[in-house]
């Protein structure tokens, strides 16, 4: 018997060792997988932000260029300009100078000037300044020759008088007897470069020859995309377009692709080592320019990896806990069977040895039956613990929502810290502390359920519960562009419930609505309150694709879900909580589309 028990105990240790080894291996795989997935997701999110920023910057540039082209067009056709060029005299040129000065102040350009057919500037908006353009020869400029020959010209170059880089937009002026000269508008981009430098990402613009003409990184202006040959360098120098600019290669190396963008290594001014970044490009309409926006990936990836690891390891912990409970149940069952077999054998030997003592034998049998009954009660308790193991699988689903809010607050806090808005940072930290307390409350609720099997019910304001749930999800709602319509006429609406449980139900319903609206162009969630006889009804509706056929009748069945990453427990837990509050939770698929969930709870006296 002793040998048998030792063998049995040795066999019981082996499954636990195997389970521990399996959990360690899965933990390593979860960390590796979470790192890869989180890095990919972080890169995709960063690239999307960069593309949006680049498109906005291109739109701003295009708007500024179109405005100055319109100014050029109007000046080239102005009657005073044509009349003065046709018969120039000092008085007429003086009036033209003043007119250009007034136009320039309203147009927002840097300089507007008129060049005659000989290439000499005869009037300019800066005629009062020491470095006036009046009298300068621009016959060598490509934009002047292009405008005289084709009608229009455009060139980004370093000013020959001002030594300030800018875009020269030119148009031919034609009188009754033919060409009279060229109208030129010069636009400088200092304001754009300053604005780009204040943003989270950096920006630079490159022309078709690979020369950086605009940049939020100051030293990069007039760098080139690649090393130039002596002949190419000489050609650019002879054009006088970039003066004595260094024309050295841009410190950007493309290492691979990140979605539709480039994964690049960049050496920023003053940095000791290269920075890995994601870069995207966008063409600037009406020019031969390409705008590039880039941003480092290290910080974004680190934040995403940290969150992904936490979620992955927490999910693994839940699964491991369930597996441990099941293994413990199976082993206890096996031990009970072994003890029962040993007891039965002992009783048979006792009966055979003591057949003459029938009374004693009957007494021994009664004791054995009583012990077997206690063993059956132990097995029933073990079965209840196994059911609790299934309930524990919902912990990951319930905790995942506060963790997402914590991550959003943390990311926002980092941005606010960079801006030194410490009051807002302190507010975010307070929100994070409240959410961690909420996670503790959720886990304590499951532990309490295992120990006591009940939920306390007390008067709770339904409106405050909705406000609290929306506050926790406000970052998710904003990120997904979801409009929430909630303006209760009754305040407060007291119902009989548990505050944490009630907020869990509302968060689950709003969270499900957000996920259902992922592909909806103008997502809207509507929350309505209504009172009936002794009951308060909270309805959460959305304008999403609705509930697929065949899902509605299984909506509250455990582990039944149509979401790729769902566990199918959120609505089940919500319905169970509603039942414990003496209420109901139901789902409906309106004829006009979308989905609707109604929570009914008794009104507090």
Image: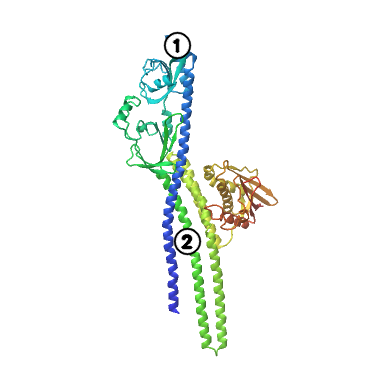
Q: Is residue 479 visible?
A: yes
- Taking 173 as reference, is 507 left or right? right
Where does label 1 land, which residue?
86
Q: Residue furthest bottom?
A: 356
- Residue located at (46% from left, 27% from top): 65
Q: Position of residue 134 (x, y in %)?
A: 39, 15
Q: How is the image coloured?
A: rainbow
| Residue 168 visible within the image | no
User: Foreground mark, 2 or 1?
Assistant: 1
Q: Which residue is mark 2?
A: 320
In the image, is residue 361 above or below residue 586?
Answer: below
The location of residue 427, given as percent across then percent down, is 49, 43
Q: Element under label 2?
A: helix
Which disc is residue 1 wearing?
none
Q: Residues within 10 Å of mark 2 (few under 14, many from 20)?
A: some
Residue 195 higher or lower than 141, as above or below: below
Q: Indicate the quadrant where residue 550 lies.
A: bottom right
Instruction: Please name whichever residue, 177 or 395, is drawn nearer the observer in this view of the structure.
Output: 177
């Amino acid at each position: 018997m002793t040998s048998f028990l030792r063998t049995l105990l040795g066999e019981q240790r082996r499954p636990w060792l195997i389970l521990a080894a399996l959990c360690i291996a899965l933990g390593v795989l979860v960390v590796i997988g979470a790192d890869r997935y989180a890095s990919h997701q972080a890169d995709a999110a960063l690239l999307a932000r960069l593309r949006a920023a680049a498109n906005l910057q291109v739109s701003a540039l295009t708007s500024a260029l179109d405005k100055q082209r319109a100014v050029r067009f109007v000046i080239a056709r102005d009657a005073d300009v044509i009349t003065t060029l046709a018969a120039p005299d000092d008085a007429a040129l003086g009036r033209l100078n003043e007119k250009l000065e007034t136009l320039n102040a309203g147009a927002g350009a840097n300089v507007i000037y008129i060049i005659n057919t000989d290439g000499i500037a005869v009037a300019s908006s800066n005629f009062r300044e020491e470095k006036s353009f009046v009298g300068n020869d621009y016959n060598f400029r490509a934009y002047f020759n292009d405008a005289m020959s084709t009608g229009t010209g455009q060139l980004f170059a370093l000013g020959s008088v001002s030594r300030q880089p800018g875009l020269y937009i030119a148009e031919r002026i034609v009188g009754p007897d033919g060409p009279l000269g060229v109208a030129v508008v010069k636009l400088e981009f200092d304001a754009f470069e300053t604005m780009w430098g204040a943003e989270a990402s950096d920006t630079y613009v490159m022309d078709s020859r690979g020369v950086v003409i605009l940049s939020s990184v100051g030293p990069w202006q007039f760098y080139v995309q690649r090393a130039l040959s002596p002949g190419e360098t000489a050609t650019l120098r002879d054009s006088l377009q970039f003066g004595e600019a260094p024309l050295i290669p841009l410190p950007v190396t493309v290492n691979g692709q990140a979605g539709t963008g480039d994964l690049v290594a960049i050496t920023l001014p003053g940095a000791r080592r290269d920075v890995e970044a994601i870069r995207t490009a966008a063409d600037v309409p009406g020019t031969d320019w390409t705008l590039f926006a880039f941003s480092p990936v290290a910080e974004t990836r680190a934040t995403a990896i940290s969150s992904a690891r936490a979620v992955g390891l927490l999910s693994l912990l839940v699964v491991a806990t369930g597996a441990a409970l099941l293994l413990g149940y199976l082993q206890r069952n096996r031990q009970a069977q072994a003890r029962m077999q040993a007891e039965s054998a002992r009783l048979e030997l006792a009966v055979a040895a003591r057949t003459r003592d029938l009374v004693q034998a009957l007494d021994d049998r009664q004791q054995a039956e009583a012990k077997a009954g206690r063993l059956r009660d132990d097995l029933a308790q073990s079965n209840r613990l196994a059911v609790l193991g299934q309930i524990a699988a919902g912990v990951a689903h319930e905790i995942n929502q506060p963790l997402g809010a914590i991550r959003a607050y943390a990311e926002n806090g980092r941005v606010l810290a960079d801006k030194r808005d410490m009051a807002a940072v302190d507010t975010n930290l307070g929100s994070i502390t409240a959410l961690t307390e909420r996670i503790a409350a959720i886990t304590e609720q499951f532990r309490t359920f295992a120990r006591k099997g009940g939920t306390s019910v007390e008067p709770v304001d339904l409106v405050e519960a909705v406000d609290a749930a929306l506050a926790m999800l406000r970052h998710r709602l904003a990120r997904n562009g979801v409009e929430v319509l909630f303006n209760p006429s009754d305040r407060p609406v007291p119902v009989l419930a548990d505050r944490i449980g009630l907020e869990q139900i509302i968060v689950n319903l709003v969270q499900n609505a957000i996920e259902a609206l992922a592909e909806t162009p103008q997502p809207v969630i509507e929350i309505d309150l209504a009172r009936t006889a002794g009951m308060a009804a909270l309805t959460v509706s959305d304008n999403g694709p609705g509930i697929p056929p065949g899902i509605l009748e299984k909506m509250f069945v455990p582990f039944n879900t149509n979401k790729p990453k769902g566990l199918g427990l959120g609505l089940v837990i919500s319905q169970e909580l509603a039942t414990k509050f003496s209420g109901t939770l139901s789902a409906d698929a309106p004829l006009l589309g979308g989905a609707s969930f109604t929570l009914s709870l008794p009104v507090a006296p």
